[in-house]
Image (spheres, coloured by chain):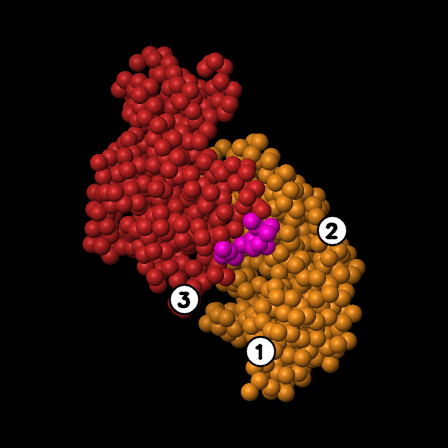
Chain colours: A red, B orange
Amino acid sequence: MLDNISKVLPVGQLYVPSFEDFKDVVDHLSKNNYYTNHGPLLKSLEKELSSYLGVKYVLGVTNATIGLIIALEALHEEGSVLTPRFSFPATMNAICMIGANVCYCDTLQDSPNACLESLEDKLINDNSIKTILLPNLWSTLNQIEHIKFLAKKYCATLIYDSSQAFSCSYEGEKISINGSAEVFSFHATKLITSLEGGCITTNNSSLYEKLTHIRSSYGAVGNVLKPLRIGSGRMSELQAGLCLKSLSYIKRSIEQNRKIFNLYKELLKPKNKYKIFEPGSRKIESSYQYVVLILDQAVNQVRGKLTVHLNNNNIFAKAYFNYDFSVFNDENPMDFPNSIKLSKSCICLPIGERITPEDVIYISKIVNDFFDSLDF
Amino acid sequence: MVDISNSYLIEKNKYIGSETLSTSSLYSPDSTTVLNYIKTSYYHKQFTNRGPLVEELEEKLLNFHKARYCITFCSGFWALVAAIKNVALKDRKYVLMPSLTYRRLDDAVLWAGFTPLYCDIDPINLGLDINSIDQKYLTNISLILAVHPMVDCLNAYSISKFALSVSIPVVFDSVESVNEKLPEGKVGNFGNCEIFSLHASKLINGLEGGYITTNDYNLYNELKEFQNFSLNSKGELTQKYSMNAKLNEGHAAFALASFDELDLLLRHNYSIYNEYLCLEKLVCDKFRIRRYNNNMSPSYMIIVAELDKKYIDCRDKLIMTLNSINILSRIYYFPPLHKKRESMIGTKDLKLTITDLYSKKLFLLPSGWPIQKDQIYPIMNLINKIIDDIYLKKC
């Protein structure tokens, strides 16, 4: 019975390899006695990812935040790093961890993508900005050519935080080479997973050498001038083995996401009270890892109530991302109206391995009933 | 001309075996135990973000160390950065530390936003010597980073007492002293906090990972926030400097399985160490094995050899030769950190006499779980021969 649903419905992707897959990897580790420090499974994963993404160099890392820290450490020389005032905090954490200043631009209205006017305005007026770190959120992509043009025009290094956009394509090509470096996440809540984990991609051989030096004390390649700070960003053989398994199922996982996303679109009745964010477009092929509702201004004050209502029905919907980002930078939040509005009006519904069509019917009914019951 | 390296390799393969020998612990926990643990994560469908195995591991570790709080990390390195960042006095510049130590210790200090300041070591235990601290720097020291050496232990009590007397916090890097009991208590209870590693080369094999023990509740909470994007229990961002440094459930499963079988590894390590001691007579004119203090319940994990001064110049070539025949012996902490970044402020006018002396005469012999007791005799014989050959300039 739909109204007696007892299983917990999470937001994350959770395409975690099966217990049998886990056993396979553990058996492999026990047989080879190779556990970490750039072992054979990691090398194999990096090769597979390089081929899948169509990029020359891939570095597996402990997690995506560490990937961002390493990429920034390798590429950002001094000054501030520009990023939209709307992302998962890891984007800003990474900037602070390398000791750089966070500088914000606004997002578009009803989209997590950077507003290009706001971005260019910052680049014109703040000459301390030397790097742009752009998140590709909700499995959608920024306006890649235009941003590349702006980065070049203002001599800024461009890095993409594509933690939420693995396997998305832009004009038919998988993203991975649109900035000097691009970072992906393999957290358990992502499309492919190594429980925690991530990777950095680049086509630049000297950057690759520098990244390998910063990543860890072993496994560095080339003879680049040693960076000042070396970190620890190794991915273990267990992580690499699980990620390889996960990658082998990716086609099926994306297809599952697409079906679930389309079913939501079919069943949800927004009636001008919210929009379902569409991550794909003519140019963008999404991997549909997120189903995001953006509430209309007239109803966004009920988001908290809706979240609680969904949670009470075992639907762990989340406000993605409702944080006070002033902790990283004290610019007036009112200067970023779209970001502020977005953080107050979006809510993310469950999608991923554990969500069945029956679950979508159940969730949609609860959401539809909730909005029908509102007296506006 | 005789190809001496090849003859070493033939001898190694014939008497020791063809496998690569290292100085890493590389304990292989029982696969069934690992899988039994991970079943819990599959049951709860939680694989990271402080899952059930991470909590179970932390509980076991805090009981083991008899500490109040324990928090696991994705690596010992980032645990170290977290500890320095959250413990050091913010308005001061230097972190006082030894130079003959873990080769990434200075990187951890730099990531935390401080500058390393080196002091000399005690020739008895090879750990930081508080008597060598240059008093003129004292008012600008934000933290004492005391590292337990590979063999033997620091006098953690007297270092803590000194730190208290000068109002400087102290963090112990106890990566090499997991099992030790000091007269004043178990390692894991000293200073503001203590850092440990769960890397595969260490005593507890979590593949990658680390943990911090502390008796300070506020610090425990700060560290918890630091490793989770600075999010507090209400989901609010609390601080600028933070990251994702969480341990995943897979690594926790390995660490738990290794921890359960710790006695097995300790017995193995002791038998290897004891065998080296028994066979020391074969090489006693060339080097001696540095002794563990049996009263401290050591792990006997690493075998440190100290060359006689006559053979000091042979060391680097010895290591190179051994590595070329798949015996991955290592120099004891190389290079000393004050030689690595000589331009660094705070190291320029320091005289580290004992550090310089010991940085030339120590090396590590093969050890760890994969080494068998009957391999020690041919290892010692071969090393004896290679040192003789190097000394007589045959190779």
**Tag 1 subunit:** B
| Residue B263: mark in rendering | 2
* Screen quadrant of the C terminus of chain B: bottom right
Can you give x and y, in whole percent of width and height, for residue A208 in the image?
37, 59
Element type at marker 1?
Answer: helix
Q: Secondary structure at mark 2?
A: helix
Q: State which mark lies toward you, 2 or 1.
A: 1
The residue lying at 57 percent from left, 46 percent from top is: A26
Binning the other alpha carbons within 10 Å of mark 3 as few (below 14), some (14 to 19) or many (20 upward) gives: few
State which chain disc 2 sits on. Answer: B
Residue B43 in view (yes/no): yes
Q: Amino acid at mark 3?
A: Gly
Location of residue A91 (image quadrant): top left
- Residue closer to the observer: A120 or B359: B359
**What's the mark number on residue A222?**
3
Question: Where, by quadrant of the figure, is residue B16 drawn?
Answer: bottom right
Q: Are marks 2 and 1 in contact (CB under 8 Å)?
A: no
The CA distance from mark 1 to mark 3 is 27 Å
Asked whether B277 falls inside the magenta stretch, the response is no
Camera-side residue of B335 and B221: B335
Please determine whether, in this image, residue A6 is positioned above or below residue B299. above
Which residue is label 1 attached to? B5
